[in-house]
Image: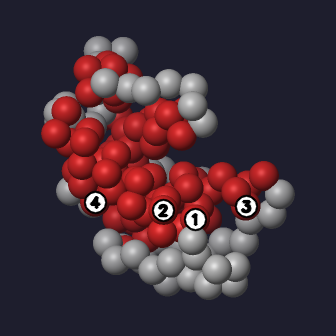
Amino acid sequence: MTWQRQQGRSAGFFPLHDLTHFAIERELGLRRAFYGLIAAGWDIEETTGKGPRGPLPPEAYAVERMVGLFDLERAGSAYWSAAEINAHCHGPTVPVEQRLPRPITEDDLDRIRSRISELLARWAVLPSGQSLEVWF
């Protein structure tokens, strides 16, 4: 178990960002990004890649790129197709070691969006001071 206190704008952003990580990693079966690292015993602070554990695994960079795209969607700035996400996270301009293990499909994208919606809905109705538990 690990946790981190956020204040100000970060307090509103990071829970949604982290739940998006969960949805992507869970739906794509990825085990070496944020939640996989937490499950392996990393502390949240270590997931910056600047701690004693050293750099992040390549998969973590790919997932962070993808989460950033969904953060933009949530803000209403974009709505991505699988082809656009693949270009950004798996395309020729992305270093090979930082690509997703495989391109995502429209079916993957539907499952991810569905999981994100479910998690964010659960978060939105959670009473202040309560916890939302997810199992990875």
Earlier sequence position, callout 3 versus callout 1: 3
Q: Are marks 3 and 2 in contact (CB under 8 Å)?
A: no
Q: Given the image, on which type of amino acid does mark 1 rest?
A: Ala
Residue 130's spot in the image, x, y percent? 62, 84
State the residue position of label 3.
11
* C-alpha separation, residue under disc 3 versus residue under disc 1: 13 Å
* C-alpha separation, residue under disc 3 versus residue under disc 2: 17 Å
Kindly identify which numbered label has been placed on residue 96: none
Residue 120 appears anywhere in the view = yes
Which image quarter: residue 34? Answer: bottom left
State the residue position of label 1.
124
Q: Residue at x 49, y 59 (%)?
A: 120
Q: Nearer the viewer, mark 3 or mark 1?
A: 1
Q: Given the image, on which type of amino acid does mark 3 rest?
A: Ala
Q: Nearer the viewer, residue 85 or 42?
A: 85
Q: Are marks 4 and 3 in contact (CB under 8 Å)?
A: no
Earlier sequence position, callout 2 versus callout 4: 4
* C-alpha separation, residue under disc 4 versus residue under disc 3: 23 Å
Helix, strand or loop at disc 2? Answer: helix
Earlier sequence position, callout 4 versus callout 3: 3
Residue 75's spot in the image, x, y percent? 60, 36
Helix, strand or loop at disc 3? Answer: helix
Q: Nearer the viewer, residue 39 or 29?
A: 29
State the residue position of label 2.
121
Which image quarter: residue 22? Answer: bottom left
Earlier sequence position, callout 4 versus callout 1: 4
Q: Nearer the viewer, mark 2 or mark 4?
A: 2
Q: Are marks 2 and 1 in contact (CB under 8 Å)?
A: yes
Q: Is residue 125 above or below residue 72?
A: below
